[in-house]
Structure formats: structure tokens, C-alpha cells
Amino acid sequence: MAICVAECISEMVQLFPAPNAIAEYTRHLIDEDFGWAIGIAYWLTYLSIFAAQNIMAASLSEYWGEKDGIWRPIVFYFAANFGTLGINMVGARLFGWVEAIGGILKIALVILITVVLAIVLADVNNEFQVGFRRNTPYAASDTAAICYVIPIVTFGFIGIEAAEVISFEAAPGSLQRPSKNIAYIASFLYLACMSTQVFSVPWTSRKLPDIYSGIGELNKRNEGGNESVTHILVVIAVRKWNKSSLDGLFDGAMIFSVIFASNTALYIASRTLYGMVIRMHNDSYLVGKLRHLSKVNRKTGCQSLLS
């Protein structure tokens, strides 16, 4: 479904360029009120993702044991936020280069993780249970287990449709081929990477996160308190291998990936807000104030970003 939506909207953007395309097409082709609801929900989703990604990056840094140090809030709650805000405020060209570099690094990381875990699977004598079984303490039936899994899996596909957000600011013709293929390629890579992770770590492992754990509960201490225990699947699998020191590399690479993802989330949230307010034509006082968010300065919507 995510692939079909991404491909459909990317095709339409090339024929009918529009800011905030998902909400705009819904307003004109289905229902105006429904389009506004989608636009607001889309904006709030990526706004919350921007904050959540910075919290997750700070949590990933706990792997090295510095949980109470002053540098973590400075780096991840101030420097990272102001850095991504600065990148987004100087125009789409710099943002495009940053995203291109970050995207290449993230794709390379996904491929590297897949290859390494495939080697781990071939080398380690796995004693894992074969087959799919529900975790009985959390799910009383297979139906309940599926209901738990669906939102978790769906969350992994958030961002597949992001190509349509940038299409309005880029040359439509140059995005024709990428917009058709990027969703399929990304989905295949993510599926291959996740499959190797799932088969590398047993579902009965006590190191896996609780189903109700929050964003900040990525790491914990073992009973002895001497070793940091992570909930990240690839780090758990590599540490179990005991033949390399790639666990720290993967954890650090994931921190940079999360920061790049927060940069993308801020961009999408600001463009979505810009696309909503620019379509407001009411003469009321509140609408007049909101329309200030659609002003473009320094080749970008600074007011939307700051909001």
C-alpha cells in the first residue's frame, strides 16, 4: 500500500505540481474537509517524528555508558536541533546535498548490515526456534499478536512517500525515474535487512525491548551493571558473534542515520505546514496570522520551519 501511494502521488506531482500534494489532491479529488484532516495529521506526524528521532539518537549514545553526562543533552537536544534547522533554512539545494549524502550512507549501512548478518547466520550454530510463534506473556492469541505487529511494521514504511514532498521544489522531469523506482528499491532493501536481523536474534531473547517500552528505553544495564545491553537487533546479533567489534560501529552509524532522519522529518513537516497555510483564503484575523507562515525568505519558508 505504501509503495502504491508513493508511486501514484509521485506520478501526479509531475503532472500537477502542488505543495503538500497528499492533502491537496485529497481536498480536490475526494473531500475538502478530509484533505485538511490529512494535512494536519501528516504535519503532526512528522513534527513528532522530528522530536522522537533526537530522543532516540540520545538513547543510542547510552551504549557507551555515558547516561548522565552533560554532553548528551547538549549534542542531541541543542546542537542537533539547531543544526538541522540551519540546514533547512538556507534553501533546498543544501538540504538536497545533505539528504543525498545521508541517503547514500544509510543505504550503504543497510546493505552492510544485511551482508554482515548473513555471514553471522552462516557462521554461527544457531539454536533458535524455527517458525513463527506468539509471545504468550504479551499476546493471548495469534490475532492479538498480529494486531500488535501491524502498527510496528507500518511505522517502518513511514517516509516511503517523501519523494512527493520534494517534487514541488525540484524539476519534475528529473524525478520521473527515481519516483517510480525508489519505493520498490527501499522496500526490498529494508525487507532483506530486517529478515536477516529477525533470523539472527531469537524472539525469546531477554535483550529485546518490551512491547510497551518507550522511545527512551533503548538501553539498559545487565544484572552485574558492567556491560551496556542494547535493544538494537543488529548490535545484539554482532555481539553474540564474538568475532568482530562492529557493534560500536553499527551503533554509531545508526546515531548518524537517526539524525539524518530527523532532518528529513523537519523538512517534510515544514513543507506540509507551508502547503496548508498557503491555501487559506479567509479574511479572518486568525487566518491572516497563519498566512504569515507561508512567506518565503532566503529561498525557504523560515516561518514554517520555526513553527
Image (tube, rainbow, N blue to C red):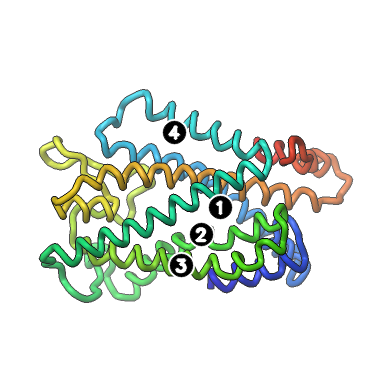
> Of callouts 4 and 1, which one flags the residue occurring earlier in the amino acid sequence?
1
- The disc placed on residue 183 is none
Among the two numbered marks 4 and 2 on one chain, the one whose residue lies closer to the N terminus: 4
Q: Determine which quarter of the picture holds residue 125.
A: bottom left
In this picture, residue 218 sits left or right of residue 6: left
Q: Is residue 15 above or below residue 73?
A: below
Amino acid found under the numbered disc labelled 4: Phe
Q: Secondary structure at mark 2?
A: loop
**Residue at 70% in and 37% down:** 302
Query: Measuring 77% from the left and 43% from the top, which residue is drawn there?
Result: 294
| 1 and 2 marks in contact (CB < 8 Å) | yes
Q: Secondary structure at mark 1?
A: helix
Q: Amino acid at mark 1?
A: Thr
Residue beneath disc 4: 76
Of 122 and 164, the residue lying toward us:
122
The structure residue drawn at horizontal position 64% and vertical position 72%, both measured from the top left corner, is 8
At mark 3, the secondary structure is helix
Q: Amino acid at mark 3?
A: Ser
Residue placed under numbered mark 2 in the picture = 158
Label 4, secondary structure: give it: helix
Amino acid marked by disc 2: Ile
Q: Residues within 10 Å of mark 4 (few under 14, many from 20)?
A: many
Structural distance between the alpha carbons of marks 3 and 2: 11 Å
Q: Quadrant of residue 227?
A: top left
Relative image position of residue 187 (x, y in whole percent): 46, 67
